[in-house]
Amino acid sequence: MSTVQAHRAAIVAALSSVPDIGVVHDRERYAKDNNAFASLFLHQPTSGPKHLRGWTLRRAATREHSPNVRRTLNEHTWTLRGYMAFNDADASELVLDDLVEQFRAVVRNDPTLGGVCQPGPLDDETDGVQVTDAGAVMFAGALCNSVVLQLKTWSYL
């Protein structure tokens, strides 16, 4: 398994470890129509009706550099997108925020994602999960809360 594949699997496992996080996909998903697309993200929470609640993952960038002659550092930047059906009565925005904070805590408590990733360099780079965007969007034909997260992982070759 390549480093990228291992990092991807570790991120999916970490996100999936959050109770009621929703359907977690290891890539962006598409379908020919809204009904088929929505079916990919239908989640049955422990309480309440089945609704859109899911995540996608994409490697957005990889940066390689050699901090010294003997080692090469790969820095992977990952984008995670989360969606949850908008439900004002259930404060779905706040529910999604709480799920995000639970995932951020998982990564904060285990930044190597079970030893799969290397610790990042000791510099001014950000650590952990960053929230880069949040708001309401139309997703699979439905109004949803949305959040975009960014995470960096490192490996030394």
Image (tube, rainbow, N blue to C red):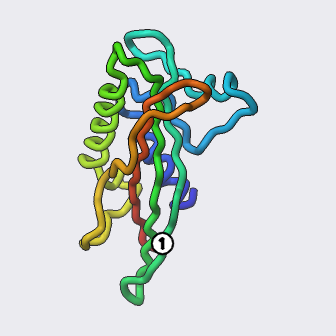
Q: Is residue 77 left or right of residue 96?
A: right
Residue 149 x, y percent position in the rendering: 40, 47
Residue 33 x, y percent position in the rendering: 73, 28
The residue depicted at 51 percent of the width and 23 percent of the height is: 52
Whether residue 114 is visible to the viewer of this picture, yes or no, is: no
The residue depicted at 56 percent of the width and 27 percent of the height is: 41
The one of 20 and 92 positioned closer to us in this rendering:
92
The residue depicted at 38 percent of the width and 11 percent of the height is: 47
- Callout 1: 10 Å neighbours few (<14), some, many (20+)? few
Q: Is residue 42 above or below residue 149?
A: above
Residue indicated by mark 1: 63
The residue depicted at 47 percent of the width and 74 percent of the height is: 157
Q: Is residue 56 above or below residue 130?
A: above
The one of 128 and 112 positioned closer to us in this rendering:
128
The one of 116 and 52 positioned closer to us in this rendering:
52
Determine the residue located farthest toward the bottom in the rendered image.
69
Whether residue 1 is visible to the viewer of this picture, yes or no, is: yes
Residue 99 x, y percent position in the rendering: 33, 32
Give the SS element for disc 1.
Answer: strand
Determine the residue located farthest toward the right in the rendered image.
32
Image quarter of the N terminus: bottom right
Q: Is residue 30 above or below residue 140?
A: below
Tell me the kind of residue under disc 1.
Answer: Arg
Q: Is residue 95 above or below residue 128?
A: above
